[in-house]
Image (spheres, rainbow, N blue to C red):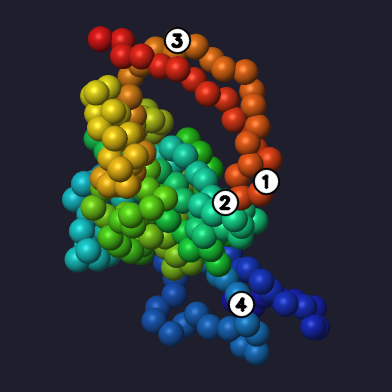
């Protein structure tokens, strides 16, 4: 197969969609050209195939496939430099409503920002399982999925109805006071986002404050336990 390009033209990304695997080891190569990114999408028959559940993933897991819904996608940045992203992150949910965070390194973020969309079910293969980090963490999990340019991503319509769009892990309302107390005393025991079921009792007017020397709009809410 030949991909023609104009003289002096640089191919930043090359995507190949194949109805079935046709390359053996060493058959795919580029001649006198450098690709900054390439990805091969192979349409396979996944009907009846056994997928690994997110809770079964471990650091020793190799050559497995997961079928998950991308619930949310966001960019991880720092307040001091919002234009320079640290990573592209997303929340994955499987058939058992188990949620796990996935991350894409900054140099692959632009590509996967156009490939992945919120609410869609995908099959992932050739990904890495890495320890969860202590910051920019939305669920309390030991591991997270790391997506790279070698990861195969296939959009699927199978089992779409069985995978929820959202997954919540509610904590006791009283535990919020424990979190506030520990943070006030610089004893940080919580490094992930939490969910709580409550009612909104009041909504403050929109105000502004400076975050990293940038004027930022904020709105404060007052909530209470519904139990």
Q: Quadrant of residue 208?
A: top right
Q: Is mark 4 on a helix, strand or loop?
A: loop
For marks 1 and 4, the one nearer the N-term is 4
| One can see residue 84 in this view | yes
How far from the left and from the top, in percent, is residue 110?
60, 59
How far is mark 2 from mark 1, CA to CA?
A: 9 Å
Q: Nearer the viewer, residue 116 or 91?
A: 91
Residue appearing at x 25%, y 10% in the figure: 227
For marks 4 and 3, the one nearer the N-term is 4
How far from the left and from the top, in percent, is residue 15?
58, 64
How far is mark 2 from mark 4, CA to CA?
A: 33 Å
Q: Which residue is labeled 1 in the image? A: 214
Per the rendering, the mark at residue 121 is none
Q: Do the residues labelled 2 and 3 touch (CB within 8 Å)?
A: no
Q: Which of 128 and 140 is in front in this view?
A: 140
Q: Which residue is labeled 4 in the image? A: 35
Furthest-front residue in view? Answer: 185
Q: Which of 116 and 14 is in front in this view?
A: 116
For marks 2 and 3, the one nearer the N-term is 2
Residue appearing at x 37%, y 48% in the figure: 137
Q: Are marks 2 and 4 in contact (CB under 8 Å)?
A: no
Q: What element carries label 2?
A: loop
Q: In this view, does 153 lie to the left or right of 15?
A: left
Q: Which residue is labeled 3 in the image? A: 201
How far from the left and from the top, in percent, is residue 27?
47, 82
Pair 2/4: label in front: 2
Quarter of the figure with the N terminus: bottom right
Q: Which residue is labeled 2 in the image? A: 79
How far is mark 2 from mark 3, CA to CA?
A: 30 Å
């Amino acid at each position: 197969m030949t991909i023609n390009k104009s003289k002096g033209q640089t191919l930043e990304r090359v995507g190949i969609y194949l109805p079935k695997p046709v390359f053996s080891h060493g058959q795919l190569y580029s001649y006198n050209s450098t690709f900054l990114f390439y990805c091969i999408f192979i349409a396979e028959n996944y009907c009846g195939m056994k997928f690994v559940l997110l809770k079964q993933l471990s650091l020793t897991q190799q050559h497995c496939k997961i079928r998950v819904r991308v619930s949310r996608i966001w960019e991880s940045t720092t307040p001091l430099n919002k234009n320079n992203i640290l990573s592209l992150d997303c929340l994955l949910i499987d058939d058992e409503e188990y949620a796990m965070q996935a991350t894409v390194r900054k140099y692959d973020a632009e590509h996967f920002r156009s490939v992945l969309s919120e609410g869609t079910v995908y099959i992932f293969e050739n990904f890495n399982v890495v320890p969860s980090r202590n910051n920019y963490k939305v669920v309390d999990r030991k591991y997270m999925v790391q997506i790279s340019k070698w990861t195969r991503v296939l959009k699927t319509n199978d089992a779409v109805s069985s995978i929820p769009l959202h997954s919540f892990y509610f904590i006791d309302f009283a535990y919020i006071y424990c979190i506030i107390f520990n943070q006030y005393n610089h004893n940080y025991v919580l490094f992930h986002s939490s969910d709580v079921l409550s009612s909104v009792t009041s909504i403050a007017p929109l105000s502004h404050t400076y975050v990293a020397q940038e004027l930022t709009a904020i709105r404060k809410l007052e909530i209470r336990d519904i139990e």
